[in-house]
Image (tube, rainbow, N blue to C red):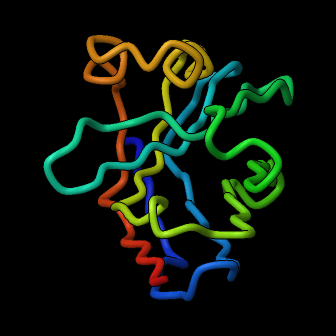
């Protein structure tokens, strides 16, 4: 059974940095994709960044140049390094995994696609104050 466990969220002032981690276990796919999604109160879940098992990445425009997604294959851990944080980055951040590429979810922000992603973590809260 696939399990995704996020950590690393917290409260930070604007301009600060955080690194989110997601420990993944239980998947047996030879090819797979992982991603970070976020949801603020009253808003739809949004794709932030995704990485395929070949290392190809995608980012939503609002975080390009500030966030970096990476995958430590040896330790089965996904990271999201977030720099220059802004108040609008405040949200619950979720780790996701699927056999299909999650990069489409980030590039298109398709609600049906995002709703159909198979595996999710429980989320970690990020709060950025001005």
Residue located at (56% from left, 67% from top): 86
Residue located at (83% from left, 55% from top): 74
Of 29 and 128, the residue lying toward us: 128
Of 72 and 18, the residue lying toward us: 18
Residue 85, by quadrant, is bottom right
81 sits to left or right of 40 = right
User: Percent position (x, y) of residue 51?
Assistant: 71, 32
| Quadrant where the N terminus is found in the figure | top left
Residue located at (50% from left, 12% from top): 108
Circle count: 0
Residue 41 versus residue 127 in the image, above or below: above
Of 108 and 3, the residue lying toward us: 108
User: Percent position (x, y) of residue 41?
Assistant: 18, 56
User: Percent position (x, y) of residue 105?
Assistant: 49, 19
Q: Residue pushed farthest left? A: 42
Residue 30, by quadrant, is top right
């Amino acid at each position: 059974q696939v399990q995704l466990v996020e950590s690393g969220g917290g409260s930070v002032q604007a301009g600060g940095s955080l690194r989110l981690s997601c420990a993944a276990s239980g998947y047996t796919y030879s090819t797979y994709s992982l991603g970070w999604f976020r949801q603020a109160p009253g808003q739809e879940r949004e794709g932030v960044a995704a990485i395929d098992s070949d290392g190809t990445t995608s980012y939503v425009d609002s975080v390009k140049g500030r966030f970096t997604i990476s995958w430590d294959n040896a330790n089965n851990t996904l990271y999201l390094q977030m720099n220059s944080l802004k108040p609008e980055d405040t949200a619950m951040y979720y780790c996701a995994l699927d056999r299909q590429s999650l990069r489409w979810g980030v590039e298109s922000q398709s609600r049906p696609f995002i709703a159909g992603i198979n595996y999710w973590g429980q989320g970690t809260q990020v709060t950025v104050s001005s």
